[in-house]
């Protein structure tokens, strides 16, 4: 799978990218909402995994902004998972179009199982 990992904590991003890569997935890391939008404009992804708290906004806004940008070009949106430290982010995440909300600390096995399953849209 091609995964865009949006995470501003560099140690976490490196560790997650390395683990996903060891399982054969292609991972690109973005540290901000704007970096993620730029990455998506240049490359197709199967999955987006984003943290909620990013330096330039909320990860919850990423998918709606991507949806707004892609209107009219017919491109399919990647499936997306949002990660936060608060259960209260679950419903807003689902309302925004994310297929799953995970609460930190995320179990790597759980994330890997989600990514390797067919994307639910």
Image (cartoon, rainbow, N blue to C red):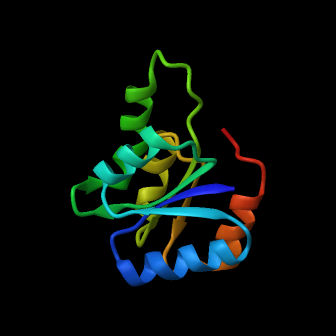
Residue lying at 53% horizontally and 47% vertically, measured from the top left: 98
Residue at 43 percent of width and 38 percent of height: 41
Image-based side of 75 in relation to 7, left or right: right
Single out the residue that lies furthest toward the top. 72
Front-most of 5 and 106?
A: 5
The image quadrant of residue 7 is: bottom left
State whether residue 67 is above or below residue 105: above
Residue occupying the point 71% across, 46% down? 119
Left or right? Give the position of 76 relative to 11.
right
- Looking at the image, residue 21 sits to the left or right of residue 66; the answer is right
Task: Give how far across and how far down residue 43 sits, in percent.
Answer: 52, 44
Say if 69 sits above or below 84 in the image: above
Image label count: 0
Image quadrant containing the C terminus: top right
* Percent coordinates x, y for residue 59 in the rendering: 37, 54
- On the image, the x and y values in percent for residue 80 come to 55, 50
């Amino acid at each position: 799978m091609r995964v865009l990992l949006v995470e501003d904590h560099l140690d976490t991003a490196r560790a997650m990218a390395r683990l996903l890569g060891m399982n054969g997935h292609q991972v690109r890391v973005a540290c901000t909402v704007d970096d993620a939008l730029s990455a998506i404009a240049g490359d197709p992804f199967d999955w987006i995994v984003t943290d909620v708290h990013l330096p330039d906004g909320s990860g919850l806004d990423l998918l709606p902004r991507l949806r707004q940008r892609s209107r009219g070009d017919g491109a399919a949106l990647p499936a997306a998972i949002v990660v936060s430290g608060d259960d209260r982010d679950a419903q807003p995440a689902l309302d925004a179009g994310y297929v799953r909300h995970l609460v930190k600390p995320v179990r790597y096995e759980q994330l890997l199982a989600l990514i390797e399953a067919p994307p639910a849209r």
